[in-house]
Image (tube, helix red, strand yellow):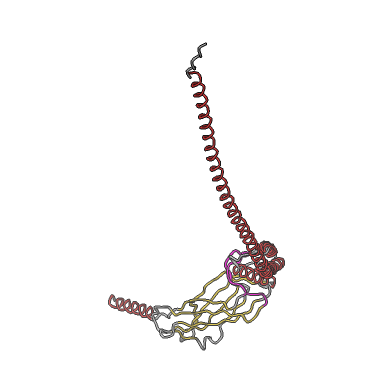
């Protein structure tokens, strides 16, 4: 009895191991790529990163890339369906595969991209005031026709845009791209600077409207912002050549004024040179006059000293005569 139980347990264990060894290969969703959405990125109204398509649009495409498990225990995965399931109750399945014609993934061809074509309903069915959930479901079928789910991922980032919402985001993107292209640009026209400021104000108003869900007014403000900024560019382009001509005219006037000032300076220099020559001549004349004056003074001193000499001489002569007269012996008195 114990021997039979041991044999039975050994058989069960072997079967369990064998079943584990031949468990079906698995597959995973590697990536999803939305083709030509009207917007993909951060949307301030929803406060999240979204992928958006316009309401009531058809023929949209999603590419789902599926990869066989990197370490499958057995060789083949038969993908029988790749399904896009929206929360408004609509499924879209990739064409070209089914339970009877699955796509085989194996070690040689482990990856394949499936295209799902889908439509988006009106906002009456799929509101544009909240984000929508969707699932990417990957199914497989085995040799006996048994289907199982390989992957079933839930996402919450699909937005349905109304026509006004789409137009608003398009104008907002256009405005931001244009402004970015003119970053660091030198605005010299007063009109252009004013228009640029008005455009920024309209863009800010558009942001406020959009965040409140007033997409019609947001569309108008964003479009006005684009128009104002384009007008600013035109005003600057028109002002540029005129401003350059003004600068050129001012430069020419400055050159003419500089030339005139140079001629005036040259004339003044000539007059100054003449004055120097005249002053030099006057100095020569003054020097000659001084020489003559010095000579006359010298001559006067000569005559002065000669006069003094004569005066002294005559004075001494007079004194001598007086002395001689006083001391001259008297002649003898004659006898009677």
Q: Is residue 172 above or below residue 276?
A: below
Q: Is residue 55 magenta?
A: yes
Question: Magenta span covers which residues?
Answer: 38-56
Placement of 298 over or under 111, stated as above or below: above
* Residue at figure coordinates x 52%, y 32% from the top left: 310
Q: Nearer the viewer, residue 22 or 48?
A: 48
Q: How many marks?
A: 0
Image quadrant in which you'd find residue 271? bottom right
> Looking at the picture, how far across and down is residue 127, in whole percent?
66, 70
Residue at horizontal 65 percent and vertical 80 percent from the top: 58
Q: Residue at x 51, y 21 (%)?
A: 322
Give the image location of residue 287, x and y in percent: 55, 47
x and y, in percent, of residue 217 in the image: 72, 66
Quadrant in the rendering for residue 202: bottom right
Task: Give the percent coordinates (x, y) of residue 260.
Answer: 65, 62
In depth, the one of 38 and 293 nearer the eye is 293
Q: Position of 146 compared to 188: left or right?
A: left
Q: Is residue 299 above or below residue 242?
A: above
Closer-to-camera residue (263/324): 324
Residue ID at (37%, 77%): 16
> In screen coordinates, is 173 left or right of 216?
left
Quarter of the image for the N terminus: give it: bottom left
Q: Is residue 185 visible?
A: yes
In the image, taking residue 211 as reference, residue 23 lies left or right, namely left
Q: Is residue 272 above or below residue 207?
A: above
**Is residue 77 found inside the magenta-colored segment of the image?**
no
């Amino acid at each position: 009895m114990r021997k039979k139980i041991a044999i039975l347990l050994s058989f069960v264990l072997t079967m369990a191991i064998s079943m584990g060894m031949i468990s079906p290969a698995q597959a995973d969703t590697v990536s999803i790529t939305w083709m030509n959405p009207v917007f993909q990125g951060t949307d301030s109204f929803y406060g999240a990163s979204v992928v958006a398509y316009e309401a009531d649009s058809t023929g949209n495409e999603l590419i789902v890339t599926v990869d066989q498990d990197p370490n499958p225990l057995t060789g083949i995965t038969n993908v029988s369906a790749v399904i896009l399931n929206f929360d408004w109750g609509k499924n879209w399945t990739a064409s070209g595969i089914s339970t009877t014609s699955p796509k085989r993934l194996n070690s040689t061809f482990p990856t394949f991209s499936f295209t799902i074509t889908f439509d988006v309903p009106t906002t009456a069915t799929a509101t544009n005031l909240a984000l929508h959930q969707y699932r990417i479901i990957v199914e497989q079928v085995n040799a006996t026709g048994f289907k199982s789910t390989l992957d079933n991922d839930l996402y919450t980032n699909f937005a349905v845009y109304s026509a006004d919402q789409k137009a608003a985001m398009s104008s907002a993107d256009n405005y931001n791209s244009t402004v970015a292209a003119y970053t660091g640009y030198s605005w010299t026209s007063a009109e252009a600077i004013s228009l640029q400021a008005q455009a920024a104000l309209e863009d800010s108003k558009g942001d406020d409207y959009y965040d409140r869900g007033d997409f019609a007014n947001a569309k108008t403000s964003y479009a006005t912002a684009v128009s104002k900024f384009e007008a600013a560019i035109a005003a600057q382009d028109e002002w540029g050549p005129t401003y350059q001509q003004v600068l050129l005219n001012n430069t020419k006037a400055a050159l003419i004024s500089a030339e005139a000032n140079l001629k005036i300076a040259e004339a003044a220099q000539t007059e100054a040179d003449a004055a120097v020559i005249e002053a030099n001549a006057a100095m020569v004349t003054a020097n000659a006059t001084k020489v003559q004056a010095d000579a006359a003074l010298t001559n006067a001193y000569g005559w002065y000293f000669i006069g003094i000499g004569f005066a002294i001489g005559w004075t001494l002569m007079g004194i001598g005569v007086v002395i001689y007269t006083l001391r001259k012996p008297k002649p003898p008195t004659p006898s009677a």
